[in-house]
Image (cartoon, rainbow, N blue to C red):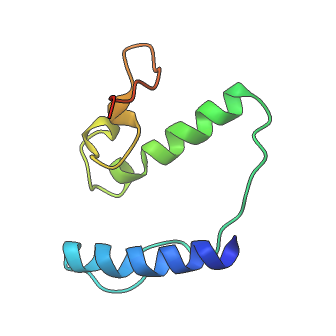
Amino acid sequence: MGRLVDMWKGYSAKEANKILGRRGPFWQRGYWDTYMRDASHETRTRRYIENNPVKSMLAASAKDWDWGSARHRDAHDRLCLPEL
């Protein structure tokens, strides 16, 4: 899994930096997996991830980020994916 994540991060970092007109590191080095202890832990982690584009000033709100799951959440925080 580590090799797959490294390859994906390398490719996506180059592409993202091209689009953003940036150079240098894009992702944090390495990765780790985490056991989700309960629903609350999962919710906190999901919100952290969904808010990363906001923290990086790539979007004004998590729902504004076209590639995130936050844009598909309803008023009750439920994920409502569009039908294909």
**Quarter of the image where one finds residue 45:** top right
Residue at the location (21% across, 72% down)? 20
Residue at the location (39% across, 26% down)? 73
Q: Is residue 39 above or below residue 63?
A: above
Estimate the x, y position of residue 62 in percent, counting from the top left. 34, 39
Asked whether 84 or 16 is in front, the reply is 84
**Quarter of the image where one finds residue 51:** top left
Residue at the location (25% across, 48% down)? 59
Q: Is residue 34 above or below residue 76?
A: below
Estimate the x, y position of residue 72 in percent, counting from the top left. 35, 30
Q: Is residue 11 above or below residue 58?
A: below
Quadrant where the image shows the N terminus:
bottom right
Residue at the location (34% across, 48% down)? 54
Asked whether 62 or 81 is in front, the reply is 81
Asked whether 1 or 13 is in front, the reply is 1
Estimate the x, y position of residue 11 in percent, counting from the top left. 42, 80
**Quarter of the image where one finds residue 5:** bottom right
